[in-house]
Amino acid sequence: MKQTITATGHENVLAEHGTTIEITKHPDLTVMGDCIIGVKASHGCADLNPELKDLIQSGKKIQVTLKVGEIEDVVIGEGHALLTLTHPDDIVIRKSDFKCQRTLMINADKAACDLKKELVDALEKPETKLEFIIEVVD
């Protein structure tokens, strides 16, 4: 099962955060949001496919592919029964095991600061289109 979410870049994308990666439906971004790599997202956690949510909540392994044109980066993490996936605007990937309504997956192998530089450079342009592909892999 997989679902593709789209978002756009923003001039304030920094991707410097050491424990999270986030996309948001909000159109604006300040430099304080150093984990946010995409704005104007097509979905928040609440909008995810119910079948996908069930698989995530069953604790399955999750892969998120971040794709801008030919540039790709992959983040692997885990679902958990306590992930409510109910936030209307945001989707957050976490290296930690912190769980809240915005959390898509925990124990991820990457945070914003670990992403490929060429991907981050592309996302600093507002016209850049990001594909955020969520896939349950086990």
Image (spheres, rainbow, N blue to C red):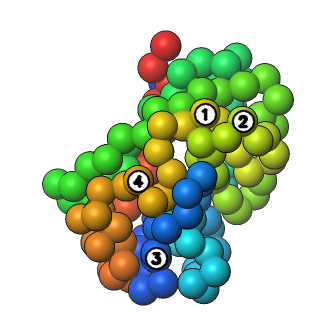
Q: Which residue is mark 1?
A: 107
Which of the two labelled residues, at mark 3 and mark 1, occupies the earlier sequence position? 3
Tag 3–tag 1 contact (CB < 8 Å): no
Tag 2–tag 1 contact (CB < 8 Å): yes
Separation of residues labelled 4 and 1 (CA atoms): 14 Å
Q: Residue at x 28, y 72 (%)?
A: 122
Q: Which residue is mark 4?
A: 114
Which of the two labelled residues, at mark 2 and mark 1, occupies the earlier sequence position? 2
Tag 2–tag 3 contact (CB < 8 Å): no
Residue 13: which numbered mark, if any? 3
Amino acid residing under circle 1: Asn
Q: Secondary structure at mark 1?
A: loop
Which of the two labelled residues, at mark 4 and mark 3, occupies the earlier sequence position? 3
The relative height of residue 25 versus residue 3 in the rendered view (above or below) is below
Which of the two labelled residues, at mark 4 and mark 2, occupies the earlier sequence position? 2
Q: Residue at x 24, y 65 (%)?
A: 118
Separation of residues labelled 4 and 2 (CA atoms): 18 Å
Which of the two labelled residues, at mark 2 and mark 3, occupies the earlier sequence position? 3
Q: Secondary structure at mark 4?
A: helix
Q: Nearer the viewer, residue 104 or 18?
A: 18
